[in-house]
Amino acid sequence: KVKGENQQLTTEKTQLTADKQTLQENLDKTSTEKKQIEDLASTLHASNIGITALKIGSSGKEKVTTTAKRTNAMRVSFVLDPNRITTTGTKDIYVCVTAPDGKVISDGGSSFDTREEGSKSFTSKVSVNYEQNKVTPVSFDIKQTDKYQVGDYKIEIYNNGFKIDEGVKKLKKGGLFS
């Protein structure tokens, strides 16, 4: 009779050990999934993107332009939307500006890792003082040493490895009848 009870207890212990292992695996999986969701939910979102071509004179005077040959800077502005999960602090925003020839305007070799496109060259890294659940306006200028080209400039904004907004600025040829 005792031998049978010992056998019963050994079987129950084996089952409980297996159940405990299954519960721990489920807990680990749930914890990993929770971290992934929090990571995704803490990614900021940008809106109201504005892209302005500027002619900045030697005196610092700014004039809005639409022609490539007059442009010597682009002002990119947008707002970071409120996010209840993202904590207050400095957030890195990566901005990629692709010229009409398909090349990213870059200081040479600067890249970051995206979640879906792999490593990507960027034009500017902007550190923003973000306050949790508040609208945060962002504005900065992009200058390049080369002359601006005629055509579409594509501006992509990234946070946490995800593209959070994009826009296009068209620069015209200029001249008397353009």
Image (tube, rainbow, N blue to C red):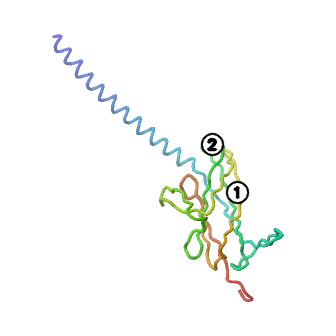
> Mark 1: which amino acid?
Val
Q: Position of residue 88 (x, y in %)?
A: 66, 43
Disc sitting over residue 103 in the figure: none
SS for callout 2: loop
Residue drawn at point x = 41 percent, y = 34 percent: 27
The residue at which mark 2 appears reads as 87
Q: Quadrant of residue 84?
A: top right
Q: What is the tally of numbered marks visible in this picture?
A: 2
Residue 108 left/right relative to 80: left
Residue 147 left/right relative to 9: right
Give the spatial CA distance, label 1 vs label 2: 17 Å
Residue drawn at point x = 63 percent, y = 49 percent: 91
Above or below, 112 against 56 in this view is above
Above or below, 97 against 70 in this view is above
Q: Position of residue 149 (x, y in %)?
A: 64, 78
Q: Position of residue 121 (x, y in %)?
A: 55, 63
User: Which quadrant does the N terminus fall into?
Assistant: top left
> Mark 2: which amino acid?
Thr
The residue at which mark 1 appears reads as 138
Residue 24 left/right relative to 116: left
Q: Earlier in the sequence, mark 1 or mark 2?
A: 2
Dot 2 alpha-carbon crowd within 10 angstroms: few under 14, some 14 to 19, many 20 or more: few
Residue drawn at point x = 30 percent, y = 26 percent: 17
SS for callout 1: strand
